[in-house]
Amino acid sequence: MSDAIKHECGISLIRLLKPLEYYKEKYGTAFYGVNKMYLMMEKQHNRGQDGAGFASIKLDMEAGERYMSRVRSAENQPIQDIFAQINDRINTALQENPSYEDNVALQKKHIPYIGELLLGHVRYGTFGKNSIESVHPFLRQNNWMHRNLIVAGNFNMTNVNELFNSLVKIGQHPKEMADTVTVMEKIGHFLDDAVAKLYKQIKKEGYSKLEASPIIAERLNVAKILRRAAKNWDGGYAMAGLLGHGDSFVLRDPSGIRPTYYYQDDEVVAIASERPAIQTVFNVKYEDIKELDPGKAIIIKKDGTVSIKQILEPRERKACSFERIYFSRGSDKEIYQERKELGKLLFPQILSSIDNDIKNTVFSYIPNTAETSFFGMVKEAQNSLNRKKEEQILSIGTKITLEQLHEILEVRPRIEKVAIKDAKLRTFITQDSSRDDLVAHVYDISYGSVKKGDNLVIIDDSIVRGTTLKKSILKILDRLHPKKIIVVSSAPQIRYPDCYGIDMAKLEDFIAFRAALALHEDNNTMHLVEEIYKKCLTQINSKDKDVVNYVKEFYAPFTADEISKKTGELLSPEGINAEVEIIYQTIENLHIACPKNLGDWYFTGDYPTPGGNRVVNKAFINFFEGKSERAY
């Protein structure tokens, strides 16, 4: 999208099901798992570039031998940085100890990062905290192997305060009020409790303290721990964890908000936030990769046993539609088709906007991520032209001349690469008043791509704030002297904040919200805005089942077309010559294009959890009171 918003985080978990010697013999290296993890993380780098982390656990190590490793980075290229560190440690160890070269047992014993369990994470800082302390995986250490916990996830919790206070009530002292810390400590608390109870039980059975350890590992009920820990979580999440003795898990939220996919064969279990990462890295069939159902966890025991357990009662499936529109890689088979369908379904609105004049219209897209929906839009333009050609030919009938036939057939959609982003240009001046001129040059224009007086249709993934459109894109497009610029969004109007992982937290950031506010001013209905504020105030202390999204009333007086029209007015730069029109995807067509991902709360305000309604009301209170802060 031309207005960049923060992406999702991404997780990768690999469990090798064979001894490391097997991979050395078959693939030529005992570092097979490390190499695959590097690829899995790189294939998901689109999900996070503020930080990356890697952790591994070695199975069946002797006491006194290191069995857990972790490395994290918040550098500019964090994935490359952490694997440069890993490779440096591996290469140094091999150079200093030539005997390790072909001895897998010595490699496992002495070289860090090699192991049977591997966990990777790529991160965008949704709270602007990009220090190393905020980078996953998080580690909870203990001298008991079973109580060591490594956690990484793609999530935001809306009830962090509540979770924090529950930890305090049971006697804990969390180091900070952050959802990652509170979630890890919540799991850790019930892990500690389960291990203690098992230890007490096993001692009663007559086993020694030393004999108890492997029995605890065998009997530990990971599903029960997760049920107790996640009971009161409110948010969207795909939570991955490793236990020190060798169990591992990935848990998905009960609404299916955050995506999780897995693959299993006799050599490996691979889990990731995106299907193409697994499909490409392990060269497996699309059909062999499964989606983890909402509320379920995939649990891999130390002995390699894999099970799918229902942890939380599933709610109505509300998988994030923004994953399909923008965040996930477009190489996924389903997502590719869905994005084309999004472009196709917009065409009737476009055709109406250009008065059916395809001949004098140029079609293009900004940015490159909108290319797939552009293909769908152009294909439908071709279909529309073909229908028109058929009508023309049939109306003339057998009297048609060769010249007339050629003239009819020569008309086709005009496709151009109108604007190109200058990837090397950086707006290094932070003050808004000083950087506007630099922002205006973020895109280069393709001069001569549009004739004077043409219509120019530009498709984008979504229009969030509209800042780049107003300060840069529309100005440079106007230099081509089009009669009309139609900016098309493959997503509907973004009206409400997200609180489940995407960095969209403030209502006043959204151009659709500002357009509705301008309409209230135009219609002298600002008293309704104050009434909505007062209703939101009543919700602050409401119980979950009573929470209502009153911000819906802010948009209710206006149609989607009225808000789109006002958006076009607000985004038209001063002095622009072309008429500007904004076209948004409809909610109905979004659901047609993405039938499996009906999570549309950013567009409709229909939040899948009570915490979402609390957040949106708080966001409106912050807006009305002039507080520039997050609502969660």
Image (cartoon, rainbow, N blue to C red):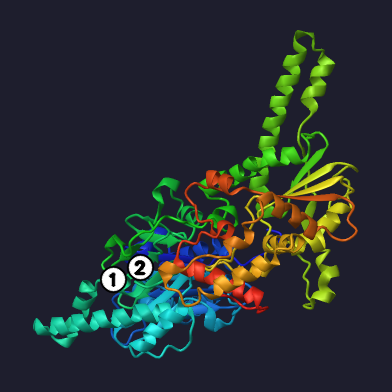
Amino acid type, residue under disc 1 in the picture? Val
Q: Residue at image x 17%, y 87%? A: 209
The reply to whether residue 51 is in sight is no
- Identify whether 595 is placed above or below 551: above
Instruction: Quadrant for the C terminus, please.
Output: bottom right
User: Which residue was labeled with disc 1?
Assistant: 222
| Residue 323 x/y as whole percent | 54, 57
Position of residue 625 in the picture relative to residue 177 (left or right): right
- Identify whether 364 is placed above or below 253: above
| Residue 361 x/y as whole percent | 80, 39
Instruction: Quadrant for the N terminus, please.
Output: bottom right
Q: Residue at image x 76%, y 60%? A: 522
Which label belongs to residue 249?
A: 2
Instruction: Identify which residue, 246 or 147, lies in the foreground.
Output: 147
Label 2: element kind = strand
The reply to whether residue 316 is in sight is yes
Instruction: Identify which residue, 100 or 235, lies in the foreground.
Output: 235
Q: Residue furthest left?
A: 206
Q: Residue furthest top?
A: 398
| Residue 552 x/y as whole percent | 58, 61
Q: Residue at image x 83%, y 18%? A: 404
Q: Could you tell which of marks 1 and 2 lies nearer the N-terminus?
A: 1
